[in-house]
Image (cartoon, rainbow, N blue to C red):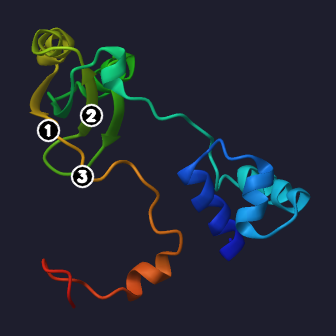
Amino acid sequence: MDSIDRRIIAALASNARISLKELSATVGLASPSVAERLKRLQEQGQIAGFTVAINPRSLGYAFQAIVRVNPLPGALDAVEKLIVATPEVIECDRVTGEDCFIARLCVSSIDALDVILKPFHKRAHTVTSIVKSQPVLRRLPPLNPNETQSRQPRNIHGTP
């Protein structure tokens, strides 16, 4: 992946609906060249898809919750299937450490949260945190990992 590919990905991350003409102008290449690069990036799996971001509140979800899930002995597969089958779970990571899963749920009310989590209680211990805000929304990692490694750590006041 070269710097032009990185600029294409950054532009798409800002606006996945950008036209090919606008994208071409942004990266300084002709439309056919950009189209070919996009095709290659998709074929190589560097672009996995295009999506839309929605506001869960507009769909009636009053809040989000982060739920740490630690299955009871022998229940790992059953719990994973339950997580996958729960439509309110919008993201889930299988992790190392004290818990096995960390799930993000969209929830309409506290009562709804209780109903959603009730099937888990027979198979797992759960710890739930209500999301107050998201200082960092899902975003791309740095497009050049080597630049990240060369960055100097900053203290709390933003100076080296």
| Residue at left offset 64%, top offset 56% | 46
Residue reaching furthest to the right: 32
- The 10 Å Cα crowd at callout 3, few under 14, some 14 to 19, many 20 or more, is few
Which one is in front in this view, the residue at disc 2 or the one at disc 3?
3
Disc ID at residue 135? 3
The residue that label 1 is drawn on is: 132
Residue type at the position of mark 1: Lys
Q: Vertical placement of 33 versus 112: above or below?
A: below
Residue 65 screen position, x and y as percent: 19, 30
Please, is residue 152 above or below residue 1 in the view? below
Dot 2 or dot 1, earlier in sequence: 2
The answer to whether 19 appears left or right of 90 in the picture is: right
Residue 99 showing in the rendered view: yes
Q: Nearer the viewer, residue 90 or 52?
A: 52
Numbered disc 3: secondary structure: loop
**Distance between the Cα atoms at labels 2 and 1?**
16 Å
Give the camera-side residue of 69 and 153.
153
In the picture provided, is 140 more to the left or to the right than 93? right
Give residue 54's position: percent from left, percent from top.
Answer: 43, 29
Disc 1 on helix, strand or loop?
loop
Q: State the count of labels.
A: 3
Q: Decide: marks 3, 1 in contact (CB < 8 A)? A: no
The amino acid type of the residue labelled 2 equals: Ala
Rendered location of residue 16, percent (x, y): 61, 45
Q: Which residue is mark 2?
A: 103
Q: Identify the image quadrant of the C terminus.
A: bottom left
Residues at badges 2 and 1 in contact (C-beta under 8 Å)? no
Asked if 43 appears above or below 107 in the picture, the reply is below
- Which of labels 2 and 1 is toward the front? 1
